[in-house]
Image: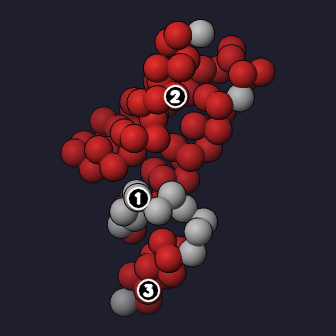
């Protein structure tokens, strides 16, 4: 279908993290997690970090086992927030 072609095009373009396999149901989760991780990277947004982690955990709960693809991106940032 055309949706599968669009997802494949999006994956092949460098718009997304290459090691995260995108499925159509993961598109919005990928975009949301990417935006939330940008907030975690910004030290001036420190007051929002706990809410960002809660939001990411909520997304992980709704993704179930599919959240494993996002762990290499999120765990290092979670640890840096805990350390700071």
Sequence-first disc among 2 and 3:
3
Mark number displayed over residue 73: none
How crowded pointer 1 is (Cα within 10 Å; few <14, some 14-19, many 20+) is rated as: few
Q: Quadrant of residue 47?
A: top right
Q: Is residue 12 visible?
A: yes
Residue linked to disc 3: 5
Q: Residue furthest left?
A: 65
Contact flag, marks 1 and 3 (Cβ < 8 Å): no
- In the picture provided, is 3 more to the left or to the right than 80? left
**Residue highlighted by disc 2:** 77
Q: Dot 3: what SS?
A: helix
- In the image: residue 27, left or right of residue 48: left
> In the rendered image, which residue does mark 1 sit on?
19
Whether 68 is drawn above or below 81: the answer is below
- Picture coordinates of residue 6, whole percent (x, y): 49, 81
Residue at mark 1 to residue at mark 3: CA–CA distance: 18 Å
For label 1, the SS is loop
Kindly identify the residue that appears in the image at 51 percent across and 58 percent down.
Answer: 17
């Amino acid at each position: 279908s055309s949706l599968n072609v669009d997802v494949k095009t999006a994956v092949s373009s460098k718009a997304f993290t290459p090691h995260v396999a995108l499925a159509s149901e993961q598109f919005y989760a990928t975009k949301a997690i990417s935006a939330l991780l940008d907030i975690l990277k910004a030290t001036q947004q420190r007051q929002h970090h706990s809410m960002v982690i809660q939001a990411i955990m909520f997304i992980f709960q709704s993704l179930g086992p599919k959240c494993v693809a996002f762990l290499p991106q999120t765990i290092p940032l979670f640890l840096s927030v805990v350390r700071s």
